Amino acid sequence: MIPLRRILIWISGASAGLGAALAATIPFENAELVDISRRGGTPGAQHVAADLADPESWPLVDKDFRQRIEAGDPELVVFIHNAGTLTPLGSADRVDTQQYTRNVLLNSAAALVLGHSFLSALSGRNCEQHLIMVSSGAAMRPHEGEASYCAAKAGIDQWVRTVGLEQRHRSPGCRVISVSPGSIDTDMQAELRASSPDEVPVSQRFREMEALGQLAKPEIVARTIWSLLDRDLETGAVLHIRDVT
Ligand SMILES: NC(=O)c1ccc[n+]([C@@H]2O[C@H](COP(=O)([O-])OP(=O)(O)OC[C@H]3O[C@@H](n4cnc5c(N)ncnc54)[C@H](OP(=O)(O)O)[C@@H]3O)[C@@H](O)[C@H]2O)c1
């Protein structure tokens, strides 16, 4: 019998929204899926219970990357860093300090640290490797009331461009890309629509989009993200979903 090839996939935030849709639409039959989130409960996934806004959780994820990669000879390894939060929505001078700090730790720091852990765990491995960072249009456009979120996504994009240059010197190297998924009908969107138009003016646009049925279904976006694995993209590419659909 021909042995099945070993495929390892980690998705952060696979417990809800786009992450859950990514977990439900994996285009491989025999992949070993790991959800990194607080809630877990994702069908077919193993759960690394982690509050990624707490730096003490990051070594747990690092260990999971290393243990699973070392436990066998994976042929394909994928990490989609999707977990993120808008909380607390509001101007930087008015929001709660503790919530704001958690936002920075999750959206900015965890992305860059877990990205590093993944690359480090794969260093020297001879297998196909993909790291996909979920970004946002907010990386390019400043949205009042979302300062730390906008800055985090812009930082992720620049990290991807830079690490992409580094990975071109590696063979095989990891293909590192970021993708803005567009406006999707998830809990995050509902939180945005519920915010005050005075504090978060862009929320009005999303209320209108929802009323017009213009928010994308998470499964459709998820399938497009999976299709990126087979596309001829340079490592370090920063994409918007509308450019690849
Ligand atoms: N929805 C949109 O329109 C939109 C637009 C642009 C970009 N995005 C990006 O797409 C990604 C997914 O967003 P979504 O709309 O699917 O959001 P969502 O419905 O709010 O889901 C967020 C996911 O992130 C996880 N998460 C949040 N805080 C976490 C923490 N402290 N530790 C670990 N996991 C945490 C949640 O899991 P637990 O609660 O179980 O921990 C959940 O699975 C995000 O990176 C977001 O910035 C979304």
Image: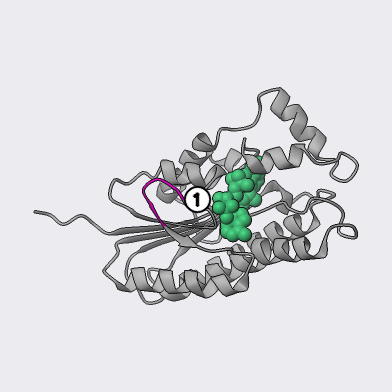
Above or below for 72 versus 107:
below
Is residue 193 shown left or right of residue 67?
Answer: right
The colouring scheme, among rainbow, by chain, secondary structure or one colour, is one colour
| Residue 101 spot, x, y in % from top left | 75, 66
The magenta segment:
41-46
Above or below for 7 versus 183:
below
Can residue 208 be found in the magenta stretch? no
| Residue 33 spot, x, y in % from top left | 38, 54
Q: Is mark 1 within 8 Å of ligand 1?
A: yes
Above or below for 121 versus 22:
below
Quadrant of residue 18 within the rendered picture: top right
Q: Residue furthest left?
A: 1
- Look at 60% across and 63% down and name the residue there: 161
Q: Which residue is mark 1?
A: 14
- Look at 76% across and 37% down and name the residue there: 193
Amino acid at the residue labelled 1: Ala
Q: 50 or 75, which is in the foreground? A: 50
Q: 31 or 87, which is in the foreground? A: 87
